[in-house]
Amino acid sequence: MSDALFTNSSSVVASRRILYTPSSFAKSSLFHLQEIGTLKALHEHSSARKDMDSYLFFVVLSGSGELIYGKREYRLQAGDCVFIDCKEDYVHRTANEDLWSLSWCHFYGPNMQAVYSKYRERGGTPVFTPKDFDSYCKILKNLYDIAESEDYIRDMRLHEKISSLLVYLMEDAWETREGHPEGCEPGRKSAVRDIQEIKDYLDRNFKKKITLDELADRFFINKFYMSELFKARYGITIGAYLTQTRVTYVKQQLRFTDRSLEAIAEDLGMEITYLSRMFKKVEGVSPSLYRKQWKGRFGSSK
């Protein structure tokens, strides 16, 4: 990797970076690193880019500056994080009065546009201040160390670390959503807490017929608002979650018992034909074929 490692000092910045070239497999199938590094501004410094197939994440280690992105200006200071889609125009800069140091990575991957859209949908913002800043710094250091190594499965390890970074970002996106000023509206904070209670209720009562109106009445929450909060937190609608939970139950029964499909359907209060259609839509095979495939010739379900 020596040809990809650069230490650069100029009149403007001192930086250390790795320009990373992933394998064709990584580019087509994995979250992959494009560039990673650190910099210390020596004088006033500005960087502007646009229309790049890349996502940029960076942390402000010290000093301050600003980001212009999505026609908005964001003030940045030590402890802040930035996560942006580089297809959009952006500028970040620091001024002489409080020069910054940064740690950053550019990365990309299949479906990253959908991932970033989900991040924004969950409440994620281009700039945020995390509770656990050190965890982000640690992931960036891990990414740098892996990119610098000669590990023969380096691309897989980078994929794993970028996935960890995205998990942290998604978690902080929800924290941001909960802490949004709109949270001061009457009943909003209690409604957010109720979403976990609603999920717990669904987990306990999935065998029963459950409607949105019933849930809204039970938990004293508007059904449309409840649906919005549930999908934002769990990434799935209430109806889809119920279907998923019921299908999981059917799979357990088909694999680990000899109960008939009629008996399983009765458990769920469903007609057998409806249950079969629901199961095949989710799993792609009929319940009987699923049982045959997973129990095998001798009835083993291991």
Image (cartoon, rainbow, N blue to C red):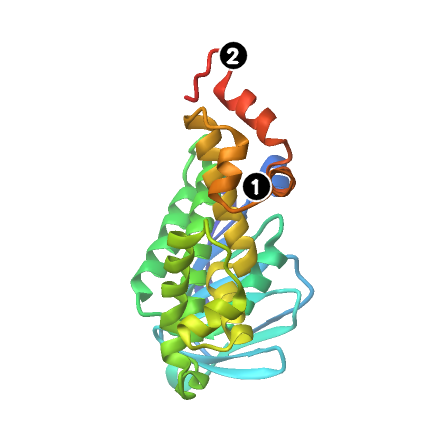
- Closer to the chain start, of discs 1 and 2, is 1
Q: Residues within 10 Å of mark 2 (few under 14, many from 20)?
A: few
Q: Quadrant of the C terminus?
A: top left
Q: Is residue 21 above or below residue 88?
A: above
Q: On screen, 95 above or below 163?
A: below
Furthest-top residue in view? 298
Q: Which residue is mark 2?
A: 297
Which residue is depicted at the point 65% across and 72% down? 89
Instruction: Look at 37% across and 58% down and name the residue there.
Output: 200
What's the mark number on residue 22? 1
Residue 285 picture location, percent across and down: 63, 31
Note whether 160 is above or below 251 in the view shown. below
Residue in view at x 63 percent, y 31 percent: 286
The answer for how far apart the CA atoms under marks 1 and 2 are is 43 Å
Specify whether residue 41 is in view.
no
Q: Amino acid at mark 1?
A: Pro
Find numbered disc 2 in the image and state the secondary structure of the residue it sits on: loop
Image location of residue 75, percent across then percent down: 46, 83
Foreground residue among 113 and 76: 113
Q: Is residue 260 visible?
A: yes
